Amino acid sequence: MGIFGVIGHPISHSMSPIMHNCEFKQLGFPHHYTAFDVHPNDLKKAIDGMRALHILGLNVTIPHKVAVMEWLDEIDEEARLIGAVNTIKNENGRLIGSNTDGEGYLRSLQKLIDHPFHDKNVLIIGAGGASRAIVTALARYGISRIDIANRTLQKAEQLAMHARQFVKSNAIPLQEAEEKLSTYGIIVNTTSVGMSPNLSDMPINIHHLKKGTIVSDLIYNPLSTMFLKKAKEKGAITANGIGMFVHQGALSFEKWLGVAPNIERMTETVLKKLG
Ligand code: ATR
């Protein structure tokens, strides 16, 4: 039996254990996945523990995604570009860090549109860790332009500078994003605005949203934020964060075991757990 898990702080609400354990069982792997609550002061000890206990794979979540990089033996190219790790694979004692968040997001988007989306202009709201993974993946995918709007403009500027290695990218204030909302084909909320308990909050005003725009929100609890509800009312094609969550997990699973899990079944497992 192999041990897998996720390290974070706090971690008690993670849905990764149920999602991965269900797939281990369905695919006949005798493995177990568990959530480890690791205080930031204990991160190095946790990684030493991974080596000592021969834990085969870990997911890494808030607040450890950046700090953990220091303790690994190798970081792959995508994770280096994103500047964060969400997956560690133990290859005979060698710990390799990668990041499946960006690719997971791209895959969730691909399911939504049945044609390539290279020609689309994208607006990303927020400039934190999740935003950086998505911006990096979209920029490398070959989108035409990415605008980044954020409450703290300076953080958006740093991220836009990073994105400009691959694509046209500008940092803009939230108000400017609201005014030119109709020029975007894809709009993504990466901020926590709209999460419980502030369910009626919106990351931006969507008065100028055009029908048929793809609007996604990384939040999946609640399943539909006020932002998604209002966008849908205006004729947008909407998606919550379940798709990205499941796909990033599925990509980690595949890195660890060399087998692609069943996306539909994983989605059902998560939805059932969310109630
Ligand atoms: P994550 O890793 O989940 O992306 P993060 O790095 O803390 O989390 O980033 C949170 C993002 O949500 C940031 O862009 C943050 O804006 P600031 O850079 O101005 O802090 C944004 N955010 C969080 N709460 C917000 C709020 N109430 N209004 C607007 N933006 C908010």
Image (cartoon, helix red, strand yellow):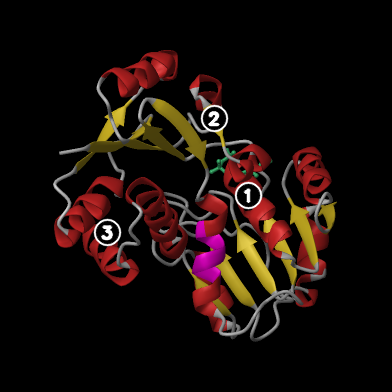
Residue 272 within the magenta-colored segment of the rendering: no
Which residue is disc 3 drawn over? 274
What element does badge 3 sit on? Answer: helix
Residue 94 screen position, x and y as percent: 43, 27
CB of mark 1 near ligand 1 (< 8 Å): yes
What element does badge 1 sit on? Answer: helix
Of tags 2 and 3, the one toward the viewer is 2
Q: Name the amino acid type tagged 3.
A: Leu
Residue 170 vertical placement versus 96 (above, below): below
Q: Name the amino acid type tagged 2.
A: Glu
Q: Is residue 227 visible?
A: no
Residue 149 screen position, x and y as percent: 75, 53
Q: How far is the residue under mark 2 from the one under mark 3?
A: 35 Å
Residue 129 screen position, x and y as percent: 60, 41
Which residue is disc 1 drawn over? 131
Residue 210 screen position, x and y as percent: 70, 82
